[in-house]
Amino acid sequence: MRPLKIAIDARLAGGSRAGGVESVVLGLAYGLSQLTDGEEEYLFLTRKGEDGWLRPHLSGPCRVLEGPPKPWPAVNWVQIRIARDHQGVGGAAWDRIRSLPERVRVPLYVSEGTIEKAGVDLVHFTFQDGFMTDVPAVYHPHDLQHLHLPQYFDPQILLYREVVYRTMCYQARMVAVSSSWIRADLIRQYGLDQDKVWVVPLAPVTEAIEAPSPAELGAVKEKFGLPDEFLLYPAQTWPHKNHIGLLEALALLRDRRNLRAPLVSTGHQNAFFPAIAARAEQLGLNGQLRFLGVVSRRELACLYKLCRAVIIPTKFEAASLPLWEAFLAGAPAACSNVTSLPEQAKDAALIFDPDDRASIAEAVERLWNEEGLRRDLIERGRRRVADFSWQRTARRFRAHYRRLAARTLSEQDRELLAAPAGL
C-alpha cells in the first residue's frame, strides 16, 4: 500500500500576525517532522511565495506543497437569506446578524485542485478558513468565540463565521479541538455528533527552542530596554484579550497599594491597539508599559525567562499556548477563569475573574510579592506541562489520520485514541 499523504493547511503569511494559529502550524511541523517511524507523507500547503516562515521547521516526512498565491482564487459566493423572526437559531450573535440586509452574499472557498493533483488522501484544516473539497478532512475551528462575545464582531463577520464554520464542520470527517470545554460547546451549539468531535491537546511551541543563554537574555533585555522585574502578557491586541482590564488592574494597584508593576506585552498590534494606548494614557500608566509588538520566537523564549511572572487576563480562549509556554519556561502564571483555562491550569496557576479589576489586581499582587508562591507555582507548572509535547500531539493526530483513512492502526495508535485527552 502506498504511503498515506496528508495535507496540512498552512496558508498563512507568517510573521506571527496569525497569532496562535501560526503557533499551532509550527508545533505540528515540529512534531510531525519527528515521526520518522511511519510511512506517512505530510504536505504543508502554503501560498506561493509565502512559506519562508515555515520551511526551516520541516524535515523528515514533511515538505512544502506550494499552492497558488493569495488570494485563494476559486470562491463560491452563497446568497444567505436572513430570517427576521427568532425561530430556529437565536442568541445575541444572531440578533446582530439580523441587522444586515435581508439577503447577503457570503464567500465559501473551494479547492482549486492543488491537493487533489498531489494525490492527497486527507487534508487537515488547521485554522477556521478552510475550503470545500471532496478530499476527506479534519477541521480545526479552535473555538466559537463569536457566539459568546458577539459584541466584538461586525455583523457581516459574524455571518461569515457562522456560514463557514458550520459548513466546514459538517463537511469534515473529524472536528478537532484542544479542550473538552470547546468540544462540549461545539456539540451543543452546532448539534454535531459526539463521535465526530475529538480533543487533541496542544503543547508549547517554545518546546522546539533551545534554552536561551545568559548572553542572549542580556541582549534581549538591552534591546528592548526592559526593567529588572516585569510582568509578561504575550497576546495580539484583540479586544477579548482584555489588555484594558489588565491596565485598569495595574492602575488600581498603583493607587491603592502603591505597587507599580511594569508590564511587557508582545504580539501584533491590530486595529484595537489605539484604544489600548489611549486607555493607558488616561490611566497615567505609560511609564510602566512596554508594548513590543511582534518579536521573534527566540526573543519570546527569552522574555519568558526574564519575567517575574506571566499574566493572562483573556476573556475567551480555546486553550492558552502562553500558559503552556510559561509553565515550560519556569515562569509563575495567573490566568482567567474562563472557558477551558481552569481545566488547563489546574493547580499550577492563580485563577481570577477577568471582568473584576480587583480580582486581577489581587492575582498580580500575589505573584509580585509572594516569593514562596512563585516557587510553588513554578514547580506545579513544570509538572503540569510535562505530559504535553508536540511529538505526542503529532502522534495523536497521526492515529486519527490513519483511522480516518482506514489504514492499519498500531498498538500505540489504539492506545492514543482510547486514552483520555488530559485537558
Image: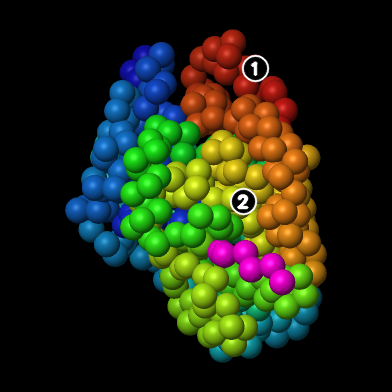
Mark 2 — residue? 309
Q: Which quadrant, please, contains the C terminus?
A: top right
How many callouts does the rendering have? 2
Q: Is residue 180 visible?
A: no
102 to 239, vertically: above or below: below
Report the predominant secondary structure element of the magenta stretch. Answer: loop
233 to 250, vertically: above or below: above
Q: Is residue 411 visible?
A: yes
Colour scheme in the image?
rainbow
Within 10 angstroms of label 2, few (less than 14), some, or many (20 or more) residues? Answer: many
Q: Which residues are magenta?
A: 258-263
Q: Residue at x 54, y 15 (%)?
A: 409
Residue 415, labelled with which disc?
1
Within 10 angstroms of label 1, few (less than 14), some, or many (20 or more) residues? Answer: few
Dot in front, 1 or 2: 2
Task: Where is residue 144? Give x, y as percent.
Answer: 64, 60
Question: Which is more toward the observer, 310 or 5?
Answer: 310
Which picture quadrant has residue 25? top left
Q: Secondary structure at mark 1?
A: helix
Direction from residue 351 to residue 44 in the image, left or right? left
Q: Amino acid at mark 1?
A: Glu
The answer to which of marks 1 and 2 sits earlier in the sequence is: 2
Q: Residue at x 64, y 68 (%)?
A: 260
Q: Residue furthest left?
A: 49
Q: Amino acid at mark 2?
A: Ala
Task: Where is residue 239? Give x, y as percent.
Answer: 59, 73
Q: Which quadrant, please, contains the N terminus?
A: top left
Determine contact: label 1, label 2, CB under 8 Å. Answer: no
